[in-house]
Image (cartoon, rainbow, N blue to C red):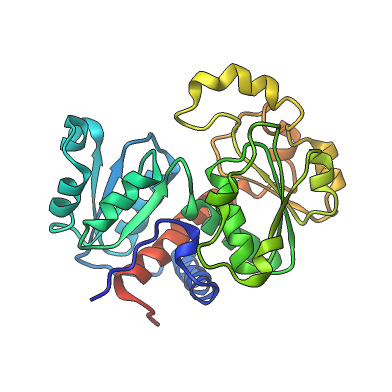
Amino acid sequence: MTIKHYLQFADFTADEYARLFERAALIKRKFKNYEKHHTLTDRTLAMIFEKASTRTRVSFEAGMYQMGGSVVHLTTGDSQLGRSEPIEDTARVISRMVDVVMIRTFEQTRLERFAQHSRVPVINGLTNEYHPCQILADIFTWIERRGSIRGKTVAWIGDGNNMANTWAQAAALLGFELRVSTPRGYEVDSQLAALDNPPPASRKAWQNFADPLQACAGADLVTTDVWTSMGYEAENEARKQAFANWCVNAGMMAAAKPDALFMHCLPAHRGEEVAAEVIDGPQSVVWDEAENRMHVQKALLEYLLLGRVG
């Protein structure tokens, strides 16, 4: 049986995403109505954390339990990964004992090495290069509020990080325009943001803007992230200076469409990458976005383990 992994956004097709978002909506409705959805009874998820987590851990763990499954939680401090056991050996062992593995780690290559030696599906819970589960939640949140994202304009303001890379892949696959504005020296890596087999239209799926206000002009969605991602803490002071003009404020939101939404993957630093009046204002959907991590991930777990159901 072919094993399907989810290591970056490009791993699924547009049709698969359409189905996944449909399923997530059903699963969320049942959750809100206190209806059981135990499609993963007797299945076990192993969660491996080499980076700290709040939303990723809670959303995966709660979601798996809500679907009738169980969870094993591991960190480098309480597993052999912390004692330099080869990733390949850890993958061979753990994947014989569980049904699916979620990993939150540093380099994408660590995740890929694990997946190459795993007998079960592996999910990217975040790497330095990509954060596909977060973009799943973001797009699902957009769909709930505004319908299809095809043809819309998304403005990414801030660091050309794992979130920006994943937004770029999503734009190419799902047919929306991404405008990226970063300080000089912090641009998106075009190779990481690209698809292996891009459709012809994807060549213009995203473009750079030196001026963040120009990137926001007429945008349907404005989104950002912290200026200093995990693993880059030593650069914090330099980044604060470089990113001083990339704080999403009321002026940027005013430049966007009147009904534009604001998103942030959290945690947020008010007064740095986003003004308090924006993240706490009426256009912000960050709390729905955070909750939706759980619902889209439940749909993802179900799809990887059971295929198309229902």
Which of 133 and 242 lies nearest the eye of the viewer? 242
- Establish if 198 lies above or below 213: below
**In this image, 89 relative to 131: left or right?**
left
Residue 99 location (% of width, % of height): 22, 62
Query: In the rendered view of the protein, which quadrant contains the C terminus?
Result: bottom left
Foreground residue, 221 or 115?
A: 115
For residue 148, say whether it is visible: no
- Depicted 283 relative to depicted 184: above or below: below
Q: Position of residue 156 (x, y in %)?
A: 69, 46
Q: Position of residue 47 (x, y in %)?
A: 28, 48
Location of residue 27 with respect to 108 vertically, above or below: below
Residue at image coords 55%, 54%:
135
Residue drawn at point x = 74 percent, y = 38 percent: 278
- At a point 44% along the width and 64% down the height, the residue shown is 11
Q: Residue furthest bottom?
A: 310
Where residue 228 sits, quadrant-wise, is: top right
- Between 77 and 286, the residue placed more toward the observer is 77
Q: Is residue 262 left or right of residue 62?
A: right
Q: At which x and y percent is residue 178? A: 70, 55
Residue 68: in sight, yes or no?
yes
Q: How many marks?
A: 0
Q: Quadrant of the N terminus?
A: bottom left
Which residue is painted at 32% across and 44% down in the image?
Answer: 110
- Residue 19 or residue 92, whichever sits in front: 92
Q: Is residue 244 left or right of residue 102?
A: right
